[in-house]
Structures are given as C-alpha cells and as structure tokens.
Amino acid sequence: MESDAPLRVVAELYRLFAEGELEQTFHLMHSDVTLIEPGDPECVPWAGVFTGHPGLRSFYDALGSSLSSIEIDADSLELLPLDAGQVLALGTERGVSSATGKSYETHSAWLWTVEDG
C-alpha cells in the first residue's frame, strides 16, 4: 500500500459523505467493516457498533431518520497519518435534529484504519 493511500481513502470517504453519495462509500469499505459510534443509543440513535455493509446501512438509516441535516466540511478536515494505515480525522460536525429542530455543532475526532487501500 502506498504511504499516502490511507489519507486518500479517508479524504474520498468524507468527500462522498459531504456530497450525499452514501452508496458510493460502500465501495471504499470492506464487507466486514466495523464502525463504532460512541454514545448511548437511547440518547443518540446512531450510537453503537455496526458491522459489515448491512451495519453501515443501519448507521446511515439511523442518521437519516434522526437528523434533518448533517454536515462535515470535507475541505476543512485535518487528516493526520498514523502508524499501520490509521488516519485521525479532526473536524467539525453540524446537524439539525428531526425530532426537535434544534441544531448542534461539535468538534470531533474520527479514527480510521485503512487496509488494502
């Protein structure tokens, strides 16, 4: 794997997400992908451990049914290469709750592991 491959893969994932091309993200994720979103599912409907493409779809569905909008500005992300194909993505997430209409903004860190990039 090229040394910058993990950075390119993660940047592409965020670009697709920002453009609403969620189906295209499946092509970049292994069929056994594990996505861990911290939090209590009672309070944060998209929190939990999601495995495989069906799990990823469940995660996207939970986001879509819980938020009327969500945005992570792919252009302002800071992508930091780590060891063993890992990339730390630092950025700001903004969204609006479907249930309450209230907006939120949070500064977040996401850790990605890229294999066979």
Image: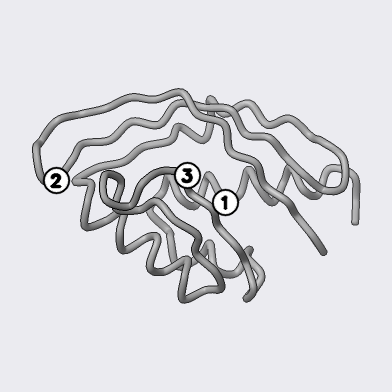
Residue 68 screen position, x and y as percent? 19, 46
The quarter of the displayed image where residue 104 is located: top left
Could you tell me which secondary element the residue under label 2 belongs to?
A: loop
Mark 1 vs mark 2, CA separation in Å: 24 Å
The residue lying at 58 percent from left, 38 percent from top is: 110
Of marks 3 and 1, the one in the foreground: 3
Amino acid type, label 2: Ser
Amino acid beneath label 3 = Pro
Classify 39 as above or below 25. above
Residue located beneath label 1 in the image: 13
Question: In which quadrant will I find the N terminus?
Answer: bottom right
How busy is the neighbourhood of tag 3: few (under 14 within 10 Å), some, or many (20 plus)?
few
Q: Which of 95 and 8 is in front in this view?
A: 95
Left or right: residue 115 versus residue 69 is right
Q: Which mark is residue 98?
A: 2
Q: What residue did someone put label 3 on?
A: 38
Q: Is residue 99 above or below residue 105?
A: below
In three-dimensional space, the C-alpha distance between marks 2 and 3, rounded to whole angstroms, equals 20 Å
> Nearest the camera: 19 or 79?
79
Please name the amino acid that badge 1 sits on. Answer: Leu
Cα gap from disc 3 to disc 1, whole angstroms: 20 Å
